[in-house]
Amino acid sequence: MSNLESPVASVTLKRTDLRGRTLGLAELKGAVPRTAPSTVATAEAAVSAIIADVRGRGHAALAELAQKFDGVVQEHPRVPAAALAEALETVDPTVRAALEESIARARAFADAQKPANVDFPVAGGAVVSSHWVPVSRVGMYVPGGLAPLASSVIMNAVPAQAAGVASIALASPPQKDNGGMPGQTILAAAALLGIDEVYAMGGAQAIAAFAYGVKAGTGPNGGGETIDPVDVVSGPGNIFVATAKRLVKGVVGIDSEAGATEIAVLADATANPVFVAADLISQAEHDPNAASVLVTDSPELADAVERELRVQVARTAHRERVETALGGPQSGIVLVDGIDQGVAVCNAYAAEHLEVVTADAPAVAARIINAGAIFVGNYSPVSLGDYCAGSNHVLPTSGTAAFSSGLNVTTFLRAVQLINYSKDALAEVAGHVITLSKAEGLPAHGDAVAVRFP
């Protein structure tokens, strides 16, 4: 337990009391804590301007944005091969060992996820197939602002490699204290995975560069190599990165809108408040806009978690950032009548990360249909999934887990259908094709079949 004589932080989570209320799905969605709409609107306006600037001015825009947002002067964002090799050679051996273990577990799970091709005989002489084909090129985004997420290199690259993607490029914000290159552990992880196309680019500008490509000779001094456009952009980021991915979707594929991180904890009176508080803090330290939400039917647990938060926040490394996140409109405690209502609230919230710490947690977790990833029981904390569970930590946020999945092997695969009919097999359904084409007012469709049987 915590030492209650330690310094105490001033932390009070906003409470939403749903007890005694019968609410539909739309009402529940409106009741759960969310980022303020004005914040999202501001991000979209700023991101649209950045995307247009990168499309129009290429490397010149990238250089100006690197200086504006990262305080870095750069001629070209490409990281030299020598810098990648040096990062791997000089990385702390314990960090390298941890990266290697994370890679091994992620690769084992990714390999197990690969779907099988299907060749289905619909009838004699008629075979319809579904074959999985990798996209040609992927642009991975790895956050590096408040936290240089070397683990995100693994989470992006391993599923893409398992899918068979031939060309992988990585972008991460330039760091002023690292010679204008991404963080050293990010470079080391890239080298460990054999990724040699790495760019010091951050934020919405990196997403724009990957989506539209950047031509050579558009740098501040007429320089700059070509950055080829990609087929899929993947990776987590802040609200600006997530917004950029949403705005370029359709030009390229995206994994999901993986923005500022979220954790929801569904807990009852059996939960350990020390564990719950620690887990809420673990995600709040990512970003001042991070969301930490407790859903419980136990007011006593809610009170105990708040007391524990005041103790633990006071001694955490990123106290100011955590206090801002916990005090924002996106964080809070939701009081419910019981686990049934708690499950309904969690399905309406559709959290990026959901922890279930209740009596019979596996059975309760099985009732959750909307979440990026579900962590079951006292010894499956979100931070395990962030690094070494074998699962992926690039997950949908802001309620998008209700309709999208976390990053996985199929993010980088396409199901291509093949239709192979013999003459006799076509003849068997020719009349139906002709009939349906006439019913739809598209007789030439039927003619294309009839002409084969004069």
Image: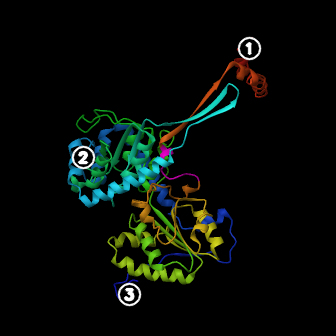
Residue nearest the observer in this picture, 76 or 88: 88
Q: Is residue 10 visible?
A: no
User: Could you classify mark 2 by the number of other residues whose Cα lies within 10 Å: few (under 14), some (14-19), or many (20 or more)?
Assistant: many
Task: Name the spot of residue 62 as percent of width and height, x first.
Answer: 31, 44
Q: Residue under circle 3?
A: 4
Instruction: Identify residue type, mark 1.
Output: Phe
Task: Name the spot of residue 23 as percent of width and height, x first.
Answer: 68, 69
* Sequence order check, earlier mark of 3 and 2: 3
Task: Determine which quarter of the picture holds residue 343.
Answer: bottom right
**What colour scheme was applied to this rendering of the protein?**
rainbow
| Residue at the image point whose x is 38% and y is 78% from the top | 312
> In the rendered view, does 362 fall on the left or right side of 179?
right
The answer to whether 9 is drawn above or below residue 177 in the figure is below
Dot label at residue 212: none
* Sequence order check, earlier mark of 2 and 1: 2
* Circle count: 3
Q: Is mark 1 on a helix, strand or loop?
A: loop
Q: Residue under circle 2?
A: 84
The answer to whether 248 is drawn above or below residue 147 in the figure is above
Instruction: Identify residue type, mark 3.
Output: Leu
Instruction: Identify residue type, mark 2.
Output: Leu
- 315 within the magenta span: no
Q: Are marks 3 and 2 in contact (CB under 8 Å)?
A: no
Q: Is mark 2 on a helix, strand or loop?
A: helix
Q: How far apart are marks 3 and 2 (CA)?
A: 46 Å
Q: How far apart are marks 2 and 1 (CA)?
A: 63 Å
Task: Name the spot of residue 252 as percent of width and height, x first.
Answer: 47, 40
Task: Determine which quarter of the picture holds residue 5.
Answer: bottom left
Q: Residue under circle 1?
A: 453
Q: Please report the bounds of the magenta region as a residue range.
A: 403-411
Classify the position of the N terminus by image quarter.
Answer: bottom left
